[in-house]
Every structure is written in structure tokens, then in C-alpha cells.
Amino acid sequence: MTTRPASFTEAMADPIRRALFVADLETDLTGGCGLCDTEAIEMCAACGQCRCDTHEDCIRLTP
Ligand SMILES: [Zn+2]
Ligand SMILES: [Zn+2]
């Protein structure tokens, strides 16, 4: 089950959602992708894309 916060304010009012949001933001800021929880070090070694993206024109080294 996926629950999406109705608003940013609502998300910030929930400690668990806030913690998740901060973790995702931290991942984004360090060069990863918070949406698919890909750390910068886990990004595709061939093209630098995350797990959100298709990698049709590169040899994907990570599963
Ligand atoms: Zn790739
Ligand atoms: Zn992603």
C-alpha cells in the first residue's frame, strides 16, 4: 500500500513521513535518486541513471 501525503505540510507533520522525506532528499542531494532509493554509489556505472530510468542504450552493470 502506498500512501502519498496530500500536501507538503501534511507530510512534515508526520514524523515517519518526515524522516522518509529527509532521507530521500539527502539521497537526491548526494547525487542519487530518492524516488527509487538509489544512492549515488548505486547509480548505473555506464550512464549514471537510476532505477527509474530505462537503460536501453547502455550496458547496465548493476541489476
Ligand atoms: Zn545505464
Ligand atoms: Zn530513480
Image (cartoon, rainbow, N blue to C red):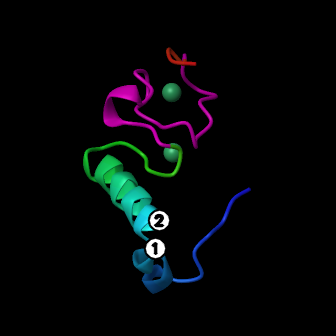
Judged from the image, the secondary structure of the residue bearing numbered disc 2 is helix
Can you say whether 28 is above or below 46 in the image? below
On-image quarter of the C terminus: top right
Callout 1 touching callout 2 (CB < 8 Å): yes
Residue at 45% x, 26% y: name it.
Answer: 44
In this rendering, position of residue 29 left or right of residue 54: left
Tell me the residue that label 1 is attached to.
14
On-image quarter of the N terminus: bottom right
Judged from the image, the secondary structure of the residue bearing numbered disc 1 is loop
Q: Which residues are magenta?
A: 37-59
**Could you say which disc has been placed on residue 17 in the image?**
2
Task: Single out the residue that lies furthest toward the right.
Answer: 1
Residue at 34% x, 47% y: name it.
Answer: 27
Q: Residues within 10 Å of mark 1 (few under 14, many from 20)?
A: few
- In the rendered image, residue 50, in percent from the top left (x then y), is placed at 49, 37
Q: What distance separates the C-alpha of mark 1 from that of mark 2?
A: 5 Å
Task: Single out the residue that lies furthest toward the left.
Answer: 30
- In the rendered image, residue 51, in percent from the top left (x then y), is placed at 55, 36
Q: Is residue 48 magenta?
A: yes
